[in-house]
Amino acid sequence: MKNINGLLCEKKCSCGKTHNCNIKYVFIEENAISKVKDITEGYKNIVLVADNNTYAVCGDEAKAQIADKCENVIVFETEGFLVPNEEAVEKVQKAMSDKTDLLLGIGSGVIQDLCKYVSFNAGIPYMIVATAPSMDGYASVGAAMIMNNMKITYSAHVPEAIIADVNVIKDAPMDMIKSGYGDILGKYSCLNDWKLSKAVNGEYFCDYIYDLTYEMLLETKDLGKRLLNREKEAVKTLMEALVGVGVAMAYAGNSRPASGSEHHLSHFFELTGIMRGEPYFMHGTDVAFSAVYTEKLREELLKIETPRKKEADGNWENEIRRIYGKAADGVIALQNKLGWYKEDKTDIYKEKWDEIKAILSECPSSKELTNYLESIELDINEFKKMYGEDKIKDAILYAKDLKDRYSVLWLFAGIE
């Protein structure tokens, strides 16, 4: 595994860009929470942000580290998933004053997204004390929010520090550890989508960022059973991989190295679940299950000898309104702005079909991915049971419309 702190520097790359990740401190070690006192030296008005579950894990300990510098504490009371929406943002903002100079988040995905988003808009830094190795956004610039019923990833800023106490994160709920593993396993899918878009659209691509992300995947993919046993070194490696992927996103300036078709499906299940009051899996778990299905699409596409244009869906807008309800106008507006439905890429697909097939064939098979999931006791049948055939089909056909990012979902929708 690469030294994560060794990645926190400026790198002039052969891709033509200069990559940087402006995180000052990353501590992934035992008793890391003891570092909070020293690294918050110089701040005078800190607002601590947590939910009732994460505060119970190490909130008092973190608060003790900042002592008289703690201006306010906000603890979200929630029984299910906390939603990073307008209401949550307002709650954090109301806990702040004109003197607030740092947000200190205690938690994982949603807490760090809230802190990232609010601190960026307030023009102040934030730090995150991780309570679970559950997702790869810790080190990224993206804040994944749900605004106006749309899942939107805003470009914000990286944290000033990531503090992951191995003694804390190894005892995280197993569902969250599985989610982190699943988020990493999904890189097989998104990295393939990135290569595909480079071939089809000439999208910017960086071999260094690709290789860095892929290395994190290789370091993690065989850890399933050890993670189930909560082995410290395995959990530490998983957390390092999650942070490393976040650094890759910071290098790229967006989430492209870590998010593709599998994330679009995951966002679909989360968004529709919230709107309809239906259950959904944790983010990384949905990503992992969805990666199996995006691989099945690649396997179907590889059977095509010569691509032909698939007839357009004349009922597209009605289907979007059926599926997305009050969020439909935003989805339709996004696609009208992109104009991808008006583009015919069939000639490009025909010209580059051999190259495209070679890229599609690089992923492990859906069976191999299923075996990885089984190693950490994630059963694909639970995914089928949770969502059902019709909802999964809707996701495959219409999850792509939530984003402005090309993936195998667009290829599958365009040819036969």
Image: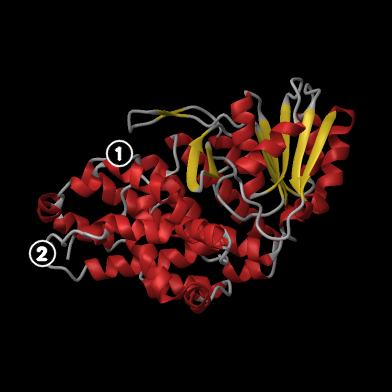
Callout 2 amino acid: Thr
Residue 129 position by quadrant: top right
Q: Residue at x 42, y 55 (%)?
A: 264
Between residue 399 and residue 348, name the one nearer to us: 399
* Residue that badge 2 annotates: 306
Callout 1 amino acid: Lys
Q: Is residue 199 visible?
A: no
Residue 301 position by quadrant: bottom left
Q: Report the side of 50 relative to 137 (left or right).
A: right
* Residue that badge 1 annotates: 337
Q: Report the side of 247 relative to 264 (left or right).
A: right
Give above or below for 65 relative to 325: above
Kind of element beneath mark 2: loop
Mark 1 neighbour density, 10 Å: few (under 14) some (14–19) many (20 or more): few
Q: x%, y% of residue 75?
A: 78, 45
Which quadrant of the rendered structure holds the C terminus? bottom left
